[in-house]
Amino acid sequence: MQKRKIPMRKCIASNKMKPKKEMIRIVKNKEGEISIDPSGKVAGRGAYISIDPLIVKVAWDKRILDCTFETALADPFYQELLDYVTRQKARMSL
């Protein structure tokens, strides 16, 4: 039986390649709205970040998503992302 290929993506904060299932996609649509994409299928330009609260905090401190999407993101978006990642990390550990 043939092994399935695991899709890999690069984290924008840590610059490490990880399996796609261990990442969260953040997407910018045509209207310029930035949102979390749990399904990974929303149309628009996407960037991946690891499901790790420490990495999200580094991205927040360095404003990495601002540079990636060439826009100024407010702190509530980063807080929402941090909360989402924390919940997903807890779900993965069950």
Image (spheres, helix red, strand yellow):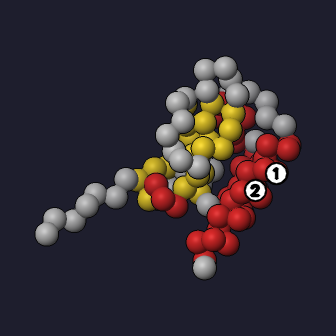
Residue 88 image point, x, y percent: 65, 64
Residue 9 left/right relative to 86 = left
* Residue at position x 58%, y 72% in the image: 92
* Residue at position x 34%, y 58% in the image: 6
* Residue at position x 61%, y 27% in the image: 29
Q: Please, what is the three-letter code of the amino acid marked with disc 1?
A: Gln
Residue 12 left/right relative to 61 = left
Q: Secondary structure at mark 1?
A: helix
Residue 87 image point, x, y percent: 71, 65
Vertical comparison of 67 with 18: above or below: above
Residue 18 image point, x, y percent: 47, 59
Q: Residues within 10 Å of mark 2 (few under 14, many from 20)?
A: many
Q: Nearer the viewer, residue 11 or 85?
A: 85
* Residue at position x 79%, y 35% in the image: 73
Q: Quadrant of residue 23?
A: bottom right
**Residue of label 1:** 79
Q: Secondary structure at mark 2?
A: helix
Q: Is residue 26 visible?
A: yes
Q: Is residue 67 visible?
A: no
CB atoms of marks 2 and 1 within 8 Å = yes
Vertical comparison of 38 with 34: above or below: below
**Residue of label 2:** 82
Q: Please, what is the three-letter code of the amino acid marked with disc 2?
A: Leu
